[in-house]
Amino acid sequence: MTPRIAIVGHPNKGKSSVVATLAEDDSVAVSPLPGTTTQARRFPMRVDDELLYELFDTPGFQRPRETLAWLTEHHPAAHERAQTVAAFVATHQQDERFHDECELLGPVLDGAGILYVVDGSKPYGHEYEAEMQVLQWTGRPRMALINLIGDGDYVDAWRRALDQFFSIVRVFDATRADFSRRIALLRGFGELSEAWRPAMDRAVEALTTERKHRQRQSAVEITDLLIVVATSRVSKVLAPEADVDAPHTELTGRLHDRVRRRETQARNAVQTIYQHASVTREEHAASLLGVDLFSEQAWRVFGLSRGQLATTGALSGAIAGGGVDVALGGASMLLGAGIGALLGGVGAFVGTPSLARSKLVGLPIGGRELIVGPIRDPNIGWVILTRALLHHRLVAERNHARREALIIEDGAETRLSEQISAADRRAIDRLLGVIGKRGGAEVSEREALEDLIESLLGARNEPGNVHE
Amino acid sequence: MNSLFEDALDIPAWLEGDRALAFRERAHRDRKLGLAIRGSRPLVRVRAWWRQVDADARPELGAQLKRTRAWVSLVLCAAGALFGSGLALAVLRYDGHYPVNVVAALALLVIAPLLLMIASLLLMPGRVPGLRMLQDAVATVNVGNLAASVFNRFATRPVGELNFDWGGSRGGPLARLAKWQVMFFSQLAGLSFSLAATLTAFALVVFTDLAFGWSTTLDVAALQAHRVVELVSWPWGQWVGDAVPGVALVEESRFFRLDSGDPVDVAAGRLTGWWPFLLMSLLTYGVLPRCILLVVARARLSAATRDVLLEDVGVRALLDRMDSAVLDSEGEGEEPPVESSSHATRASVRFADTVRVVAWDLAGEEELVDEWLITHVEKRHGSPVFLGGDNELAADELALTVFSTDDSTMVLVLVKGWEPPLLDCMDVLRSLRTRVGSQASLLVVPLGLDVGAPRADELDAWRHAIARLADPGVYVEALTEAAGKHDG
């Protein structure tokens, strides 16, 4: 039996926020203006197309007293109350005046349980009783959720009132609820009906697995970002007489751009992993100005340096000269090999610039190559890592009911950095050092770094204690 | 079907562009394919996925590089074969006077290539601390590395950091790919050299008459030379006995060019006895190790190519999507557009001499209402009429009967500012309008918590709702103390 939950209540009490949070759906319209939701909308939760539960976002009550008056007017016996509610909906289906009531009661009459949402930061009022009575008339399993939209605290008064009408009452901050609270709420749905428990348990298990999976995926992205930062370098072939300063500045800019692009790409990937792809970010780019970079120049012909080319020339000359020695039956006393090596080596060394300018099939076969990077400053890796950890933390804890931009404050990563243990620091430093020195990561190093980063991500997103 | 090399370059490139597609769509697409693809090996799964995924613009980078690589391989084979054949022809040249010197033939056709091959083994472990200079020197003279440099220079290169020459790509799977590509090129050239030299030697033996002897300046006794021959022949000595020259042949076939007369004083037929030894040497120390190394290099190149594919971040994410259940909890259909708040700004209301007061949904908040009235309204007003709340509709109707067109030109409707305006309230305002007539003003006053002013968004919500009534005589004001007491 598939659990179905209709989220109902007064207008503007955060019903849609609760749905957006549980369904991880940024498309749910959330607005401070009451009456934003005008139609019931279905949110099926599927794991590989297997339906585990359904949520229904509904409009708020608009004429609860009149609805209750109609129901009581038909004063059926207690066992016929649900049918009376159905009769009310059938009678008023086409009546614009009761559009919202029909929309919200529809899923309930179709077998959904009720999640009644109130705002615990505002005082309890008698006007709520009519709608609670209407819900009571449906006879469906009911849970009340005290949402905390503002700063006020009227939870106790609400709890006393809600206890009269609902079997389960929970406090839940829809816009700040972390993963553990969402899981606790879903488990609560399982308590509404014994028949729903297996499906809800499976849903919880699937979500928990997915959560761990997201952390791993994020760790993979962040690891790759760090490796790119530690190993990136850019190069440019220069004309022999060209000035180096301008190309060096250009290459430095290109290297910085590459690092920033990869950082942005990693941010987007992490947000996509947590279904927050559409959330805008407010973050200053990592400052790389003045960062120490490796820089070198080399003559290259076919990718060979001048020295390597001279060695090649010398060896080639020696072999050619050796051929002459063989031809002379050793009478030349290896003089051919010696002269060949000398001529080949010196010729290649002296001739490299000219050879570099030569063209083959229209392409220059070599030239002076200016290489900039990788970044020499080990602190940059830490800056990038802690910024990524901070971003992940904000994204992983962010609620889908929130609509404001993701603000990553400057300096916050420093505080985060201080929370990393010395052992983890040493291990990460060592791995980044090795990878940077070699210019790339072996599988074992990459996996070790991923494991470390995953543990750092997990440590900051462990489900906390659930308060009910 | 594409080669692994093509897939290793094309799949990551395509996945990079695929990031533009919504994650949900990618997750469903890849999971669906993942469930349909049999087999658990990541490489098989990824490549099967690539064959089945509906990709419009497939990259051609892999095919281009594969073609270039094939050309480079072909040229290397040809160059190796030419060199091997040419050298064999030169070394085995026999003009009928002096026999072919087996020592020189072995040195140039077997020992020198063997030394080069051993040198190339230095490149196999990758960068070894302490051997860097030696490795660079070996790489410099390595024909495979030169070929890789040419390939690297003229091939259309991927966007990333892939360089095919030794040390061009730094660290990680790309470096491994580069290293084994160099090794593969190197062994390919070496094998074609050895094969061509062996075949040429064999052809010369078959189609011409060669006479072999051995000659060296060194003071080597025939017995010592035979020991060396036995040592060299050890791998095949047990099976091909004819290819191991005996002591007599070694002794008889030594010659010195300074000697007058016939180079060697033995029957010409005996001097042909060296050729099986020479051919077996070429096969055993030239062709066979090159074959083994080529197979190893090929296998390692495949492994490195596989690593380039499977260690790519995009491919790893793809495998995750294929192998993990898709959780889908988003809403069905489109969310209706949110109505924006709009209401005309109205001029401030003027208080009449007498006002009547309605308190909507404020049952239980009598003290708040009284306090607010004392603070804000000095006009004459009767007791507030409490409507809404837990009143039944009939009770409200009864309470409303106290209003008529005669006794008031203004009704103050106090509401909870922190609660949203319901249509229930609008119904009451319409009913009130009917009773007090069209000339009377209805001033809706949202109260803030604890007699404070309502928040701007709360006031906005009430104004928005009242604007929908389309009644020009209904106002929404957040009365401050001064506004309520003026005109007294």
Image (spheres, coloured by chain):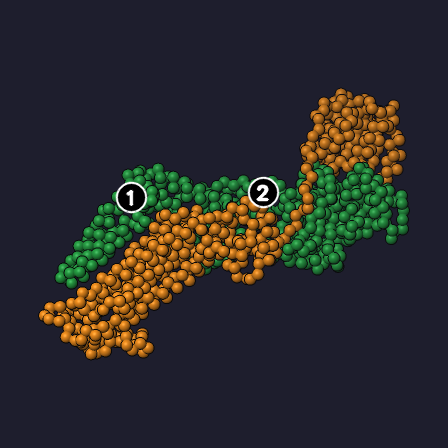
Residue type indicated by callout 2: Val
Q: Residue B325: x, y in percent?
A: 61, 56
Report in which chain the residue with disc 2 lies.
Answer: A
Numbered disc in front, either 1 or 2: 1
Which quarter shows the N terminus of chain A? Answer: bottom right
Mark 2 element type: loop
Around disc 2, counting alpha carbons within 10 Å, would you say few (fewer than 14), some (14 to 19), or many (20 or more)?
A: some
Look at 82% across and 44% down and name the residue there.
Answer: A89
Q: Which chain is green?
A: A
Q: Is residue B373 visible?
A: no
Q: Is residue B84 visible?
A: yes
Look at 57% across and 61% down and name the residue there.
Answer: B38
Judge whether B386 appears above or below B321 on screen: above
Left or right: A229, with B223 as reference point: right
Question: Where does label 1 land, which residue?
Answer: A358
Q: How many marks?
A: 2
Q: Residue A141: x, y in percent?
A: 78, 53
Left or right: B93, with A456 as reference point: left
Q: Residue furthest left?
A: B260
Residue A427, image quadrant: bottom left
How far separated are the C-alphas under marks 1 and 2?
Answer: 53 Å
| Same chain letter for marks 1 and 2 | yes
Q: Which chain is orange?
A: B
Residue type indicated by callout 1: Ser
Q: Residue furthest front?
A: B207
Q: Which mark is residue B355?
A: none
Report in which chain the residue with disc 1 lies.
Answer: A
Left or right: A453, with B168 as reference point: right
Q: Which mark is residue A279?
A: 2
